[in-house]
Image (spheres, rainbow, N blue to C red):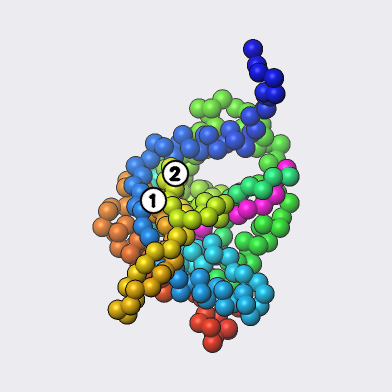
Amino acid sequence: MRDRGDRLEPFSPRRRGTVDYMRAAGRRSNVHGLVTVDVTEARARIDAIEAETGERLSFTAFVVCCLARALADHPRMNAYRDWRGRVHVFDDVDVNVLVETTVDGDRLGVPHVLRAAGGRSVRSLHDEIRAAQRSRDPTDLSAVEHAALRLPGFLRRLVWRLPQWFPRRWKAVAGTVAVTSVGMFGAGGGWAITPTNYTVQVTVGGIGERPRLVDGELTTREFLHLTVTVDHDVVDGAPATRFTSRFGALLEAAHGLPEPDDHTTTA
């Protein structure tokens, strides 16, 4: 017997797809690294651009720009193993990001793939993210997709095994790496750990303040909390560590963001 005020709601096809993805991702040999990166300089440059132009650059676009550059320096991270045991290493870095948009009247994070991110500026990535946020529903499902989500679970979950079977097909559908910006939905520091179907996924957590010695002086800095997840079946620990170090260095150096007296590189 239900209490007064309780209600029953249908389990949407979208949530069904999320459950299938998480179950398939949980079977991978994922290793998670929890890191903090000083993004004080990057945040200051974004603030300066906003003060001049009136528009705030997407922090996710900045993270994607740094991630794509780090993968260009460590290309074997941008790879998948197929059903025959071969490793496919991709030249293009196609980044699947979560963008906050309106779906059925609710504000939700939905996936969007930023293609060939390695050769693009922060401004270019920012403009595409903002366009995706303004779209009515970038994940609107076709009649065929709705029907597929009503198949038995074991059949639906076969779709999420595409990375292991057909990496090129996975790249065309979902990109090669993922950035999940859970920090955009809250405030303060903290990490998030989640399964993933990607060889490399970056989960952007919160930003918190803490003291740090800079040029011999103790000052308050802003630190970004990141979770870098890699598939150990494809990537060994040492290359993953070198990649993470390079990625962190690019973030700390505010890669892709102009200095306050240089406004030409955002175009």
Q: Which residue sits at x=39%, y=64%?
A: 210
- Between 28 and 258, the residue placed more toward the observer is 258
**Residue 129 placement (x, y as % from top left):** 62, 61
Give the image quarter of residue 219.
Answer: bottom left
**Residue 188 placement (x, y as % from top left):** 49, 56
State left or right for residue 156 relative to residue 100: left
Q: Which residues are magenta?
A: 94-104
**Residue 46 placement (x, y as % from top left):** 55, 73
- Between 103 and 115, the residue placed more toward the observer is 103
- Between 94 and 254, the residue placed more toward the observer is 254
Mark 1 belongs to which amino acid? Thr
**Is 99 contained in the magenta span?**
yes
Q: Which residue sits at x=48%, y=37%?
A: 22
- First in residue order: circle 2 vs circle 1: 2
Question: Farthest top residue?
Answer: 1
In the rendered image of this protein, does residue 107 appear above or below residue 159? below
Q: Which residue is mark 1?
A: 229
Q: Main secondary structure of the magenta part?
A: strand
Q: Where, quadrant-wise, is the C terminus in this rendering?
A: bottom right
Question: Farthest bottom residue?
Answer: 261
Q: Which residue sits at x=50%, y=82%?
A: 259
Mark 2 belongs to which amino acid? Thr
Q: What number is the disc on residue 12?
A: none
State left or right for residue 148 relative to residue 194: right
**Residue 158 placement (x, y as % from top left):** 50, 34
Q: Which residue is mark 2?
A: 194
State left or right for residue 216 relative to residue 182: left
